[in-house]
Amino acid sequence: MKKDKTISPTDEEILSRYRKTGDQELIGSLFNSYMHLVYGLCLKYLKNRADSQDATMAIYEHISDKLLATDVNHFKSWLYMVSKNHCLMELRKKNPEVHGDIFMESVEATHLNDEKIELEKDIEALEACIEELKSEQKKCVQLFFLEKKSYNQINEETGVDLKKVKSHIQNGKRNLKMCLESKNVRR
């Protein structure tokens, strides 16, 4: 029995269509996939559910206008920065006497720690996905991407035909992408 695998458009493809058409449904569906992350980030900074819900909606309204004129290459990262900056501005409005440098150092340390944890999770997912590849794909992918060897060097080292080396790398790369997407890694 064959599985029907429909390929969903990437965030960047959706953004491109949105910039061309201005269709609010496109940006709405894209934002919905990350809304829980935006809300969680707002809750982390604002420490209040009602304020976090308001901030999430304000961020949505802000990005729907901003994205019509802004070329964004990595939507998830961009949305994180926009959301974080919005929360920081809200906190400054509520407590203007907080010294910016001290506050920013604390936020920056938290942000770097969060990014490090996310990166470690992504690396673990990548390692797990590499292990799931077929043995020849795995060997060719490791030699090409991790050890920076050329097709010819891989051919000489493994004895695998040059066309097969290229094929293993291409198929391995595609399989890695699908595996990582199934583990919600989209960097």
Image (spheres, helix red, strand yellow):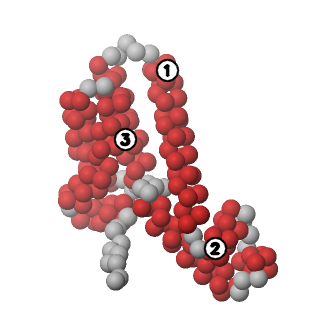
Residue 156's place in the image compared with 30, above or below, is below
Reading the image, the residue beneath label 2 is 135
Mark count = 3
Residue 9's place in the image compared with 68, above or below, is below
Residue 161 position within the rendered picture, expressed as x and y whole percent measured from the top left: 71, 86
Label 2: state its secondary structure. Answer: helix
Q: Is residue 38 visible?
A: yes
Which residue shows up at 33% across the image and 60% down it?
Answer: 15
Amino acid type at circle 2 is Ser
Q: In which quarter of the image is the N terminus?
A: bottom left
Amino acid type at circle 3 is Val
Which residue shows up at 21% across the image and 34% down it?
Answer: 54
Tell me if mark 1 has few (under 14), some (14-19) or many (20+) residues whose alpha carbon lies within 10 angstroms of its own.
Answer: few
Which residue shows up at 33% across the image and 16% down it?
Answer: 95
Reading the image, the residue beneath label 3 is 82
Reading the image, the residue beneath label 1 is 101
Quadrant hosting residue 145? bottom right
Return the disc, 3 or 2, that comes first in the chain's sequence: 3
Tell me if mark 3 has few (under 14), some (14-19) or many (20+) residues whose alpha carbon lies within 10 angstroms of its own.
Answer: some
Instruction: Tell me whether circle 1 and circle 3 mark residues in contact (CB < 8 Å).
Output: no
C-alpha separation, residue under disc 1 versus residue under disc 2: 52 Å
Return the disc, 1 or 2, that comes first in the chain's sequence: 1
Residue 171 position within the rendered picture, expressed as x and y whole percent measured from the top left: 55, 77
Return the disc, 1 or 3, that comes first in the chain's sequence: 3
Q: Which of the labelled discs sits on residue 183, or is there none?
A: none
Quadrant hosting residue 173? bottom right
Which residue shows up at 20% across the image and 57% down it?
Answer: 24
Label 1: state its secondary structure. Answer: helix
